[in-house]
Image: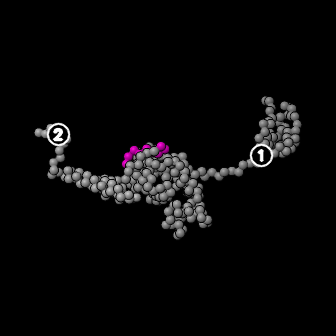
């Protein structure tokens, strides 16, 4: 019987040997690092112990999404494998052609945003930045030999340097954004992330109409000093006015000038 409060580990067990080996590796790295500091080395040697080689955990910051599982902490590049496996093993797998378009969009997105960025750090501003980049991106880049092997940022640089490439049409841009939203939506559905930052980011296909020139004061004076606006109409003659022409001109002018009749 022992009076010590610490637990003893038998010397002939594998766990004891593993613990001693791990501790020896960490102490060896600590000694090497301390010696490098004493010698004034600008760059201390890399640790050899696997317990010190592990990458530090990236913690959520203000504005980040919330990772709910280890998958939610994967990098953008790594998460594509998660998406493809989960989606294609589900009861609603994506067709091959659609999956390829989705892969192209996701690759462009992570190359532009940062392939090593954890997926939970993707914010709506990143999606808008991708949308704006698509408006500058060359179309059919996979069919152009000098663009085929370039990364998405490199293609943007080529297009920016004055090369006369056709740009992506609004329909293609909307399609790419839908694919990004679909990948992030699966992350929400499967509980990897709390919210989908791509929701609400889209490319409007509507064409902005040019503003219509307003009447000048001189033109309005000419209009309202001419027939039928220059006359006072008796109430009993209300059927003699060409109401469509009357109202159309008044509405086009933005005027509150109107015609009233009684029944």
User: Residue 262 appears at what percent x and percent y?
Assistant: 80, 30
Direction from residue 250 to residue 166 in the image, left or right: left
Query: Which one is in front, 49 or 97?
Result: 49
Does residue 65 show up magenta in the picture?
yes
Question: Can residue 24 be seen from the camera position used here?
Answer: yes
Give whichever of discs 2 and 1 has the lower sequence position. 2
Which residue is identified by label 1? 214
Report the residue at 80% width, 33% height from top: 260
Near mark 1 (Cα within 10 A), the count class, few <14, some 14-19 or many ≥20, is few
Asked if the magenta segment contains residue 30, the reply would be no
Q: Secondary structure at mark 2?
A: loop
- 129 displayed left or right of 117: right
How far across and down, in percent of the image, does residue 199 sit? 51, 46
Instruction: Give how far across and how far down residue 125 sits, in percent.
Output: 53, 49
Q: Residue drawn 43% across and 51% down? A: 118
Residue furthest bottom in the image = 145
Numbered range of the magenta stretch: 62-71
Residue that badge 2 annotates: 4
Q: CA distance from mark 2 to mark 1?
A: 96 Å
Q: Main secondary structure of the magenta part?
A: loop
Residue 67 lies in what quarter of the image?
top left
Q: Position of residue 10 (x, y in %)?
A: 15, 48
Task: Say if mark 2 contacts mark 1, CB within 8 Å.
Answer: no
237 to 108, vertically: above or below: above
In the rendered image, the vertical position of residue 38 relative to residue 124, given as above or below: below
Label 1: element kind: loop
């Amino acid at each position: 019987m022992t009076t010590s409060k610490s637990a003893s580990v038998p010397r002939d067990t594998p766990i004891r040997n593993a613990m001693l080996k791990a501790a020896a590796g960490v102490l060896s790295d600590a000694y090497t690092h301390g010696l490098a500091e004493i010698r004034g080395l600008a760059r201390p040697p890399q640790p050899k112990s696997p317990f010190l080689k592990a990458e530090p955990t990236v913690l959520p910051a203000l504005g980040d999404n919330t990772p709910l599982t280890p998958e939610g902490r994967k990098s953008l590049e790594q998460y594509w494998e998660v998406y493809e496996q989960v989606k294609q093993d589900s009861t609603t797998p994506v067709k091959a052609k659609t999956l390829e378009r989705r892969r192209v969009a996701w690759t462009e997105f992570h190359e532009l945003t940062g392939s090593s960025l954890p997926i939970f750090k993707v914010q709506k501003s990143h999606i808008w930045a991708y949308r704006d980049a698509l408006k500058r991106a060359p179309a059919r880049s996979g069919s152009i030999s000098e663009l085929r092997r370039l990364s998405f940022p490199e293609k943007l640089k080529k297009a920016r340097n004055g090369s006369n490439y056709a740009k992506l049409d609004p329909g293609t841009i909307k399609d790419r954004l839908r694919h990004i939203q679909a990948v992030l939506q699966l992350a929400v559905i499967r509980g990897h992330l709390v919210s989908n930052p791509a929701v609400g980011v889209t490319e409007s296909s509507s064409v902005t109409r040019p503003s219509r020139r307003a009447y000048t004061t001189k033109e309005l004076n000419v209009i309202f000093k001419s027939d039928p606006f220059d006359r006072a109409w008796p109430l009993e003659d209300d059927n003699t006015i060409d109401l469509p022409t009357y109202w159309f001109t008044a509405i086009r002018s933005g005027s509150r000038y109107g015609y009233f009749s009684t029944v």
